Structure formats: C-alpha cells, structure tokens
Amino acid sequence: MLYPKMYLENVTKINEEIIKKNNIKGIILDIDNTLVDYDKKLLDGAEEWANKMKKNNIKLYILSNTNKVEKVKKVATILDIPYIYFAKKPSKKGFLKIMDQMKLNEKNIAVVGDQIMTDVIGGNRCNMFTILTKPIDKRDIFITKVKRPLENIIIKRYEKYKQK
C-alpha cells in the first residue's frame, strides 16, 4: 500500500518504454512539487512531455489537493488537460471520477505524484499503477514538511526492496 510501482526523478522521465511495458493509457498527475515548484513555476520540459503524451493518445488529468482553483486552472490551461482540485487525496473519490471520465480500466491508469501519503496511497487503493517522483522543490507547505521524514524512511525501504 505504501510502495509505488516505480520511483523516478520527475514526470518527464515517463517515456514510451514505460508506457508500453505497463500498458498505460491514462495518467493522473499531481501539481504541487510534481508539475510546479513552490513558486508556481512549471517543471522544465513538462509542457513538451504532456504534448508528446497526448500526441501518443495518452489521456492526462490533474488531481490536486490544493483548494486554489486559479493555480490548478492555470497549469491545466497551459497543458491543455482537465483537472479536479481540492481532491482530498488519498480519498478514492477523485481517482475513480477520473477513471470514469477517461473510460479506462484502473490497470491502464498511472498515478504520478511526489507524496506517498496522498498520491501513492490513493492510487494504490484504486489498484492503479503508481509512480512516485522526487519533489521538484525543497520547500513544502507545513503539513507536507511534517510527513516528509516518514516518507523518506519508506523510500529508503522501497529502494532496498527493489534491489532484492
């Protein structure tokens, strides 16, 4: 439940090989520290990556816990993808709504985000393919700062587990 299926540097490392090997047809994306940094700057290469995914018929959707609709809308507009904000992850509700919107089976959907407690657990609860990314910024909101040390322990154990 706590381990992702994959751990990557950032979202732009998801390539055609990963997509094909894991039969991914849709990707649910987190925003904060996954697509944008603390200053709301979009990750370098994210727009090109999103365009490439869409060109290859991969459905993209943003699922964010933030209650700042303008922030989410701005990123969604740049990437030209739909979104849900104030999702209350790891609640299954947003994930399942997106699965319904995408008209895909859960096994064909990847969930990408920088937090185990929200993105990975939420995606795993829905039997989706979870991809944990490193946070793109060292700064975090308070509640995330509190969770990071525990998440770092889980990541270290995950890396040992993957080496076996």
Image (tube, rainbow, N blue to C red):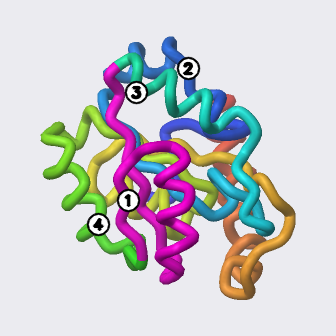
Amino acid type indicated by mark 3 = Lys
Report x, y in % for residue 160.
Answer: 71, 40
The answer to whether 145 is drawn above or below residue 56 in the figure is below
Q: Which residue is mark 4?
A: 94
Report x, y in % for residue 85.
Answer: 41, 72
Query: In percent of the image, x 55 and y 36: which residue is there?
Result: 6
The answer to whether 114 is drawn above or below residue 129 in the figure is below
Q: Quick one: SS at disc 2?
A: loop
Amino acid type indicated by mark 4 = Gly
Q: Is residue 102 left or right of residue 157?
A: left
Query: In percent of the image, x 13 and y 41: which residue is there?
Result: 103
The crowding category of the residue bearing disc 2, from other C-alpha atoms within 10 Å (few below 14, some 14 to 19, many at least 20), is: few
Q: Quadrant of residue 141?
A: bottom right
Q: Quadrant of the C terminus?
A: top right
Amino acid type indicated by mark 2 = Asn
Upstream in the sequence, badge 4 or badge 3? Answer: 3
> Label 1 near label 3: C-beta < 8 Å?
no
> Label 2 near label 1: C-beta < 8 Å?
no
Query: Which residue is more in the foreground, 141 or 42?
Result: 42
Upstream in the sequence, badge 1 or badge 2? Answer: 2
Q: CA distance from mark 4 to mark 3?
A: 21 Å
Upstream in the sequence, badge 2 or badge 4? Answer: 2
Q: Which residue is mark 1?
A: 83
Amino acid type indicated by mark 1 = Tyr
Q: Which residue is mark 2?
A: 15
Tell which tag, 1 or 2, sits nearer the viewer.
1
Q: Quick one: SS at disc 1?
A: strand
Q: Quick one: SS at disc 3?
A: helix
> Label 3 near label 4: C-beta < 8 Å?
no
